[in-house]
Amino acid sequence: MRSVVLLSGGIDPVSGRPAPPSGEIAAIGLALSAGGAVGGVHVGLPAAALGQAAGHGLGQIACLRGVGDPVAILAAHLSAAPPDLVLAGSRACGGEDSGMLPYLLAERLGWPLLAGVVAIGTVADGWLPVTIGLPLGARQDARIRLPCILCAHDAAPAPPFVFDRARRVAMHAVAVADAETIAPPEGTERPYRARPRLIGSAAPAGGGRVLDNPDPAEAARVLLDHLRALGMLDA
């Protein structure tokens, strides 16, 4: 099993200092739990946040030096020596990051993708069992065919930080062919124009009625009259 973790030059949203996003740290933890060789890949020059990410368990990080679309650069690099598993965080936190890179990369490579992964199991017959985190703490088991891309859930266990790992990490630059440049989105810029606020009320003014231990028939009649006044029932 060979796993690759996608790394970005993250920025802490509070302090503004370089820091790896929590989702990428969780992705490193998932990669380590899968066993085998684990490495990181980053498009661009080495950044300070990469060393901090390496302190959570990465021994080497490849920095792809190329010009153009980072999705195309990553796809070409991963296609040359396809790993078994590619992991990424749930969202980015720096620059013009949109969080769409794993999905665009999966589309270009033709690989399946699962998001919100909190744990992974042991590979069996080319299938990887995973656990997906759902709202309110619920969990769902699933399987995905390798090779694949997984986006880690923020609730996935994060590996501890070891300063010696961050100091010993091997970052090596990899020259790659330039990819096509993404065209800026088309659109027009216009000065801001204040729009009038639309204020309206669907219900007529009035304080309503308070019924104290009413007769059921009378309570039903008052309720129907109120719903008709709101326009929810035909008069």
Image: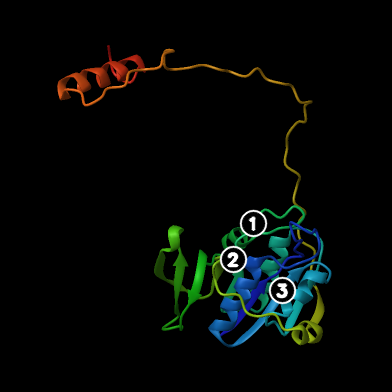
**Residue tagged 1:** 99
Q: Quadrant of the N terminus?
A: bottom right
The residue lying at 60 percent from left, 62 percent from top is: 90
**Residue tagged 2:** 109
Which quarter of the picture shows residue 224? Answer: top left
- Callout 2 touching callout 1 (CB < 8 Å): no
The residue lying at 51 percent from left, 70 percent from top is: 118
**Foreground of the two, 125 or 170:** 170
How much space separates mark 3 and mark 2, taking CA atoms?
16 Å
First in sequence, mark 2 or 1: give its number: 1
Look at the numbered disc 1 and give the secondary structure of its residue.
loop
**Foreground of the two, 222 or 171:** 222
Residue 158 visible in the shown view: yes
Q: Give the amino acid at mark 3.
A: Val
How much space separates mark 2 and mark 1, taking CA atoms?
17 Å
The crowd level at tag 2 (other Cα within 10 Å; few <14, some 14-19, many 20+) is some
Look at the numbered disc 3 and give the secondary structure of its residue.
strand
- Callout 3 touching callout 2 (CB < 8 Å): no
**Residue tagged 3:** 41
The crowd level at tag 3 (other Cα within 10 Å; few <14, some 14-19, many 20+) is many
How much space separates mark 3 and mark 1, taking CA atoms?
16 Å
Residue 113 visible in the shown view: no
Q: Give the amino acid at mark 2.
A: Leu
Which quarter of the picture shows residue 212? Answer: top left
**Relative to 65, does residue 37 appear above or below in the rendering?**
below
The residue lying at 74 percent from left, 83 percent from top is: 60
First in sequence, mark 3 or 1: give its number: 3
Look at the numbered disc 2 and give the secondary structure of its residue.
helix
Q: Quadrant of the C terminus?
A: top left
The crowd level at tag 1 (other Cα within 10 Å; few <14, some 14-19, many 20+) is some
> Left or right of 164: which side holds 139?
left
> Left or right of 62: which side holds 29?
left
